[in-house]
């Protein structure tokens, strides 16, 4: 998994007034939990830009006043009108403790059903997985080259080393749907 470093500073005042002042100055109040204690901190809004506006999941190295914590984003809050980032929750991660994250799905190959005139559909862009940090890939690659016309790939059909898929086993990840042209061609053959 890729990592990004974010420089931050601890918060001393946790009240409503102090939080408003932080946001006015272009900072985002945040918290990291999952360790021995919750740590409240803040960082500039630009520090989080690379983390938020991407489909990828990153391990974040939070440099809070010189102390480095490994974490992942657990929750984000945006202003309802201006769409500005107003808060981020991080979960501290450890090498020996499994975590649950949603990883993006990437389709690989050319499906047989698409060659026959079908339309490829990616039903789930992300899948929930459980595993250790060292085993988590950047993307879950699904090979669709043998996917025939009208067939699907379900979560139960997928396996990845040292990862547990948490989505429902019968949940469809990708499918090749019949188009009108493919249906007409199929009826002519019959």
Image (spheres, rainbow, N blue to C red):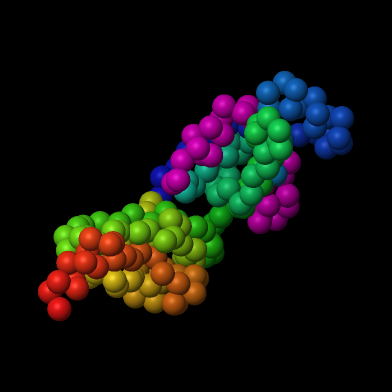
The one nearer the camera, 83 or 86, is: 83
Q: Residue, x 83% and y 37% (percent of image)? A: 14
Q: Residue, x 81% and y 29% (percent of image)? A: 20
Q: Residue farthest to the top?
A: 25
Asked whether residue 37 is drawn in magenta, I would say yes
Q: Residue farthest to the left?
A: 189
Q: Residue, x 44% and y 60% (percent of image)? A: 124
| Residue 33 against residue 178 in the figure, above or below | above
- Left/right placement of residue 45 relative to residue 60 reads right
Image spot of residue 67 (x, y percent): 61, 39
The number of discs equals 0
| Residue 28 against residue 2 in the figure, above or below | above
Q: Quadrant of the C terminus?
A: bottom left
Rendering quarter of residue 15: top right
Q: Residue, x 23% and y 60% (percent of image)? A: 181
The one nearer the camera, 137 or 117, is: 117
The one nearer the camera, 79 or 32, is: 79
Image spot of residue 164 (x, y percent): 44, 71
Q: Do we see residue 14 in this rendering?
A: yes
- Left/right placement of residue 175 relative to residue 57 reads left
- Left/right placement of residue 24 relative to residue 17 reads left
Rendering quarter of residue 40: top right
Q: Do we see residue 113 in this rendering?
A: no
Asked whether residue 9 is drawn in magenta, I would say no
- Left/right placement of residue 104 relative to residue 20 reads left
Image spot of residue 65 (x, y percent): 65, 32
The one nearer the camera, 70 or 129, is: 129
Specify start and end residues of the magenta stretch as a single range: 32-56
């Amino acid at each position: 998994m890729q990592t990004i470093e974010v420089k931050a500073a601890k918060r001393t005042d946790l009240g409503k007034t102090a939080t408003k002042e932080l946001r006015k100055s272009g900072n985002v109040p945040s918290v990291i939990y999952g360790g021995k204690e919750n740590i409240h901190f803040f960082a500039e809004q630009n520090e989080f830009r690379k983390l938020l506006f991407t489909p990828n999941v990153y391990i974040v190295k939070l440099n809070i006043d010189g102390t480095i914590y490994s974490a992942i984003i657990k929750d984000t809050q945006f202003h309802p009108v201006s769409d500005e980032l107003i808060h981020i929750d991080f979960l501290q991660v450890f090498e020996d403790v499994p975590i649950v994250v949603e990883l993006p799905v990437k389709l690989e190959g050319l499906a047989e059903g698409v060659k026959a005139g079908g339309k490829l559909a990616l039903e789930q862009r992300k899948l929930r997985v459980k595993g250790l940090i060292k085993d988590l890939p950047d993307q879950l690659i699904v090979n669709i080259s043998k996917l025939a016309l009208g067939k699907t790939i379900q979560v139960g059909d997928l396996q990845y080393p040292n990862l547990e898929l948490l989505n429902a086993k019968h949940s469809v990840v990708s499918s090749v749907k019949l188009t009108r042209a493919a249906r007409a061609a199929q009826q002519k053959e019959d």
